[in-house]
Image (cartoon, rainbow, N blue to C red):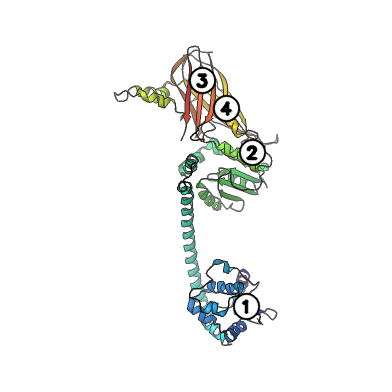
Amino acid sequence: IISCNKKMAAEESSDEDWEECDNENEDFKTKCLFCTSLFKTSKDAIVHCKADHHFSLAEVKERFKMDYYDFVKMINFIRSTGALPADVTECDEAPWQDEQYLKCVLNEDAILCFDFDSVEDLLAAEKGKVPSETPFAQQLEQAQAECVMYRQSLHKVVTELEMVKSRAAELMTNQETETGSTSSASDDYFVSYSDYSIHEEMLKDSVRTLSYANFIMRNEELFNGKTVLDVGCGTAILSLMAARAGANTVYAVDNSTIIFEAMDIVRQNHLDQSIQCIHGNITTVELSKVDVIISEWMGYGLLFESMLDAVIVARDRFLKDSTQIYPNSSSLYIAGLSNEKLFADKVTFWDSVYGFQMSCMKAKVVSECHIVSVGAKDLCTEPIVIKTFDISTIQVEDLQFTVPFHLLSNQNGNLHGFVIYFDVSFVPPSQKGCVITMTTSPEAPPTHWKQTILLISKPCGITSKEGIHGNLSYHKCHNDPRSIEIEISYSTKTTSETCTFVMSR
């Protein structure tokens, strides 16, 4: 079909060319539909089919109300199945409806070039006559009408494709629920990332987004001509950046239905030749090896939602060189918190609520991790790095830990809790490369991660230069591995306490 259509398209400029397509050249042979006979022209073959096989194309066309595409499928059906004339003329329903019959059986099948749309031509051919030529104005009018029809058909197909895409996204979202999956917590996680507001918040976080953009654009040599994997791509913003930096192939993988919007975004930016959007879990998708992995995996308190687990799996499955993963290092910080207003809003508030005692709520409130922004003035100790992560070597089991800390008070006042925050670094292998560090410190511009606040049960008095000793633990919740249980044990001169917090969705 393709070769024939190309031939016909190239011959639109003159009536002589159309005649050439119908008559074929001296060396071209047309094979009969039902026997091995060869003919110089397609008209001769049609006459032969009528005379020797009692098979009339004109009658078949009228009976089945066929258009050109039905004609193509019927010809290929006959040639591929070895059908007899009776198999076509005596059937109740056309057996050639399958789209597979659009594929040509014979290379350069001349009979497909015949003007099947004209019954008059068919009847004339079957009688061995050459039909009179259609006036050019009439041909033009017919072509314009067909153009309108094809445009309407194309619009209908595009509309139907959008409906199919929407339905597919809905089915993929509900599939696990319908099959009774036990991994509802993980399912809820992916469903939550189908919400556009989450991606809007992340994209509007200029500290976050520009940190990645600056690293990629200032280190283009790491991406130019390379194969890149974007784990948890979301709207594919990092994939777009990598492609613009010259990446040859970018795999944008996400298990959320946001991937369907990512496909549209990639096409809209004309980068679909280099970016492949893939809907699936990184633990099960199949990809070729990649040169670079880039991912924005950080959650509240650094490890909330356990996306780093998936990045580690991707690193071990697909990355050629484990050092080419970005960001490639991270640090977790802790500091003491002194903020009377925050403690009053979150804890003291429950002592009297419109004249009613609700202090029983305090235990619930104190056990929650609060994601809020605080300032440098709210830190009553100097921050310290409590744990570092080398993303090129870290293992999943290393993401659950207990580490000691020793803080030193920098003021007289009250300790109301602890502040957790993190930074990540993008360190290229070459010393000539540009290192980028992004921080969520209270002393830096705010991000959508804010800080993670762990409030203690009641204020604890501290003095300047007083030491605060303790241990911090991170563990995944048993009922939801994407949630985190944080335990902090601390001691001052006057107080010792162990507090447990849950960070969950």
Image location of residue 214, percent across then percent down: 60, 38
Q: Amino acid at mark 2?
A: Ile
| Numbered label attached to residue 325 | 2
Query: Which of the pair 18/235 is nearer the observer?
Result: 235
Does the rendering let one see residue 372? no
Q: Amino acid at mark 1?
A: Cys
Mark 3 lies on a secondary structure that is strand
- What residue did someone put label 1 on? 21
Q: Residues within 10 Å of mark 2 (few under 14, many from 20)?
A: many
Which of labels 2 and 1 is toward the front?
Answer: 2
Q: Is residue 220 left or right of residue 196?
A: right
Mark 2 lies on a secondary structure that is strand
Which of labels 3 and 1 is toward the front?
Answer: 3
- What residue did someone put label 3 on? 489
Q: Amino acid at mark 4?
A: Phe
Residues under labels 2 and 3: Cα distance? 34 Å
